[in-house]
């Protein structure tokens, strides 16, 4: 099932998307977080709140807009990307031959980074001139927990969506801790909706991005260094995950800093991200 947060006639609602038909059916829910927290896995539990609407009639928002939950991100989680990052000169303290870390690199993004499909991503002139794109598979926690065992990790996932982990590479490098390079307003486009876990084989998804129509990233989640159960086990160790928490699993090779010279984003560029079965997330930069 595909579940979206959308605005129609000035009202924010949650609905079930039929991507093939191009429609969304509003359901009775106080928001996506309420739906996730009360989810029992049965479509029948979602009572209709009106007639289906054409997707062209509504304004899609981020599935969890301006979330009050954690946005947890993982860096350098594809081998070829880890290498291109280390060789780019933008990784503080990079050591040749030590591109693959023994433990996941984990950081967070604040709620003000989140925008939805089609929303403009700000280029923040005067703050950064080295903006990069990073398409990522993001999972949404459905059943909370702490010290989650790897063998039980998939039981805790509600669904999946697409995230573009937009990054100011100069700030990422200069401050060593990645937060300031990742935390600028609008730097986490998300969407177009959440696809529930029962419809997704997260171990075999093609992850792609395009800049102005040029394919830049193209890899499979089978290439993850730290797989999803490992990430959930590490992140939940001694730290409680709650329903609605978002974990972005890392980006593949092909980001702007991987080119010589780097191909940074500028005002007027459009980035499109796609993942098998999860739809397409496209955002202009200005």
Image (cartoon, grey):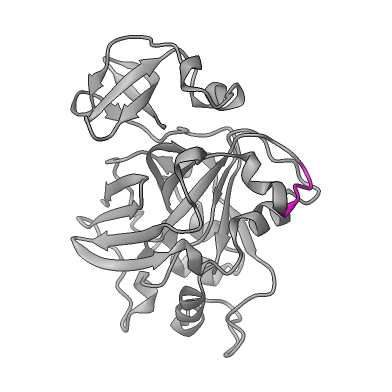
Magenta residues: mostly which secondary structure? loop
Span shown in magenta? 146-150
Report the residue that reaches farthest toward the bottom.
Answer: 96
Relative to 270, say whether 54 is above or below: above
Left or right: 69 with respect to 281? right
Q: Position of residue 22 (x, y in %)?
A: 22, 30
Left or right: 81 with respect to 230? left
The answer to which image quadrant residue 52 occupies is: top left
Q: Residue at x 37, y 69 (%)?
A: 255
Can residue 197 be seen by looking at this rendering? yes
Q: Position of residue 65 (x, y in %)?
A: 45, 32
Q: Position of residue 271 (x, y in %)?
A: 27, 56
Q: Which quadrant holds the N terminus?
A: top left
Q: Residue at x 33, y 49 (%)?
A: 122
**Foreground pick, 101 / 182:** 101
Q: Residue at x 43, y 49 (%)?
A: 163
Q: Position of residue 192 (x, y in %)?
A: 35, 39
């Amino acid at each position: 099932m595909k579940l979206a947060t959308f605005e129609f006639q000035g009202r924010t609602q949650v609905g079930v998307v039929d991507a093939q038909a191009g429609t969304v059916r509003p359901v009775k829910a106080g928001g996506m977080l309420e739906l996730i927290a009360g989810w029992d896995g049965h479509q029948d539990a979602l009572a209709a709140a009106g007639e289906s609407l054409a997707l062209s009639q509504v304004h899609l928002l981020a599935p969890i807009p301006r979330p009050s939950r954690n946005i947890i991100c993982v860096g350098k989680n594809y081998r070829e990307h880890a290498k291109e990052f280390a060789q780019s000169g933008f990784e503080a303290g990079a050591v040749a031959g030590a591109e693959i870390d023994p433990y996941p690199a984990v950081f967070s993004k604040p709620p003000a980074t989140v925008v939805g499909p089609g929303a403009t991503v700000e280029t923040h002139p005067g703050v950064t001139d080295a903006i990069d794109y990073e398409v990522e598979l993001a999972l949404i926690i459905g059943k909370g927990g702490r010290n989650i065992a790897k063998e039980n990790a998939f039981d805790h996932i509600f669904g999946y969506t697409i995230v573009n982990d937009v990054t100011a590479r100069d700030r990422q490098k200069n401050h060593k801790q990645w937060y300031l390079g990742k935390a600028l307003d609008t730097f986490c486009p998300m969407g177009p909706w959440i696809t529930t876990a029962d419809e997704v084989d997260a171990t075999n998804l093609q992850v792609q991005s395009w800049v102005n129509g040029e394919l830049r990233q193209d890899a499979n989640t089978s290439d993850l260094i730290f797989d999803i159960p490992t990430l959930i086990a590490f992140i939940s160790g001694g730290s409680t995950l709650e329903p609605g928490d978002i974990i972005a699993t890392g980006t593949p090779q092909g980001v702007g800093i991987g080119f010589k010279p780097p191909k940074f984003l500028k005002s007027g560029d459009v980035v499109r991200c796609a993942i098998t079965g999860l739809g397409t997330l496209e955002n202009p930069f200005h």
